[in-house]
Amino acid sequence: MTEQFQDRLKRDRDSLHRFLFENFSVRGKLVRLDSAWQAVLERHPYPPPVRDALGEALAASALLASTLKFEGVLTLQLRGEGPLKLLVAQCTSHMTLRGMATWSGDVAQGALSSMTGDGQLAVSIESESDQQRYQGIVPLEGDTIADCLQIYFENSEQLPTRLWLTVDERASAGMLLQRLPEERKSSVADEDAWPRVVTLADTLTDEELLKLSNQELLKRLFHEEDVRLFEPTPVSFRCGCSKQRVESLLRTLGQQEVRDIIAQHGAVEVRCEFCNRSYQFDKVDTAGLFAGDEPGLASKTVH
Ligand SMILES: [Zn+2]
């Protein structure tokens, strides 16, 4: 039994599981980030309150990205005027994620809104194929990331959605429930189904969400319901930064600006805030960068 239980837990690591209630139109997702979460923490040390907010935001970004119907990226961005300045959690539809946060001074443990002060939460979705972008912004009100997202769901034309999130230094986990439009005409309408499953899900403790296998968790919460659990999808840490992206950033800075930096520091260094990777460009590298430009024109740029 114990061995079997361990196996199941192993199966849930760094993965997203979809599940479906057989008798009414509610679907759910469970996510666990283990190595993916450690990969974020290895790159930057965070004070515990910032770390916890980031971990929950990452689990939320994975749950929301898994609902995308196209290839793209979902970004949760919190901007505040308190000690927590900026927090970004990003997950692609391929279930690769990255995140970072910046803060200043001492950050006391407490409600999210006390860390951020006045601030806002932006949820943006970018499609890979047609460069379409959608963004929803809500004020940062509420004690947790899940509370803020709740306000976002209520303000946007989303399907009724609820999230439960939790985190510790080893793992981050979350559950999403979503009420789908009634499709199955043959099934008897169960009006109470949505409030019933939400009430049951509200009994979920942080401990259960972090420690139980998904199968055990669903059994404990919804033992009277018929729930189908699907095969897991792996979730991993991956930063989308690249030399090409940094090059295009330098191009937007302009040749003169880049030359000035090199003259002063010997090289341009750009560090990715997500993965901490450093990109260095010296005189030779940057010459290639602006090779297409007419040198005569660029040097005439007036400051
Ligand atoms: Zn990076």
Image: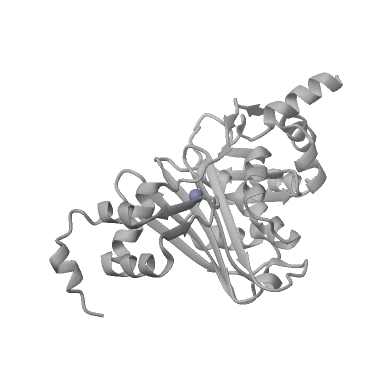
Q: At 50% from the left edge and 46% from the top edge, which residue is drawn? A: 239
Query: Foreground: 244 or 64?
Result: 244
**What residue occupies the far right of the structure in this picture?**
2
Q: At 40% from the left edge and 40% from the top edge, which residue is drawn? A: 71
33 left or right, relative to 86: right
Quadrant holding the C terminus = bottom left
120 left or right, relative to 246: right
**Residue 212 percent coordinates (x, y):** 79, 35
Vertical placement of residue 2 versus 213, above or below: above
**Residue 254 percent coordinates (x, y):** 28, 66
171 left or right, relative to 264: right
Quadrant holding the N terminus = top right
Q: At 52% from the left edge and 29% from the top edge, which residue is drawn? A: 186
**Residue 235 percent coordinates (x, y):** 58, 36
Is residue 192 visible to us here? no
Query: Foreground: 207 or 178?
Result: 207
Q: At 42% from the left edge and 40% from the top edge, which residue is drawn? A: 69
The number of numbered badges drawn on the structure is: 0
**What residue occupies the far bottom of the structure in this picture?**
303
Query: Foreground: 40 or 290?
Result: 290
**Residue 199 percent coordinates (x, y):** 74, 48
The image quarter in which residue 171 lies = top right
Query: Foreground: 107 or 114?
Result: 107
Image color mode: one colour
Is residue 143 visible to us here? yes
The image quarter in which residue 234 lies = top right
Vertical placement of residue 274 versus 8, above or below: below
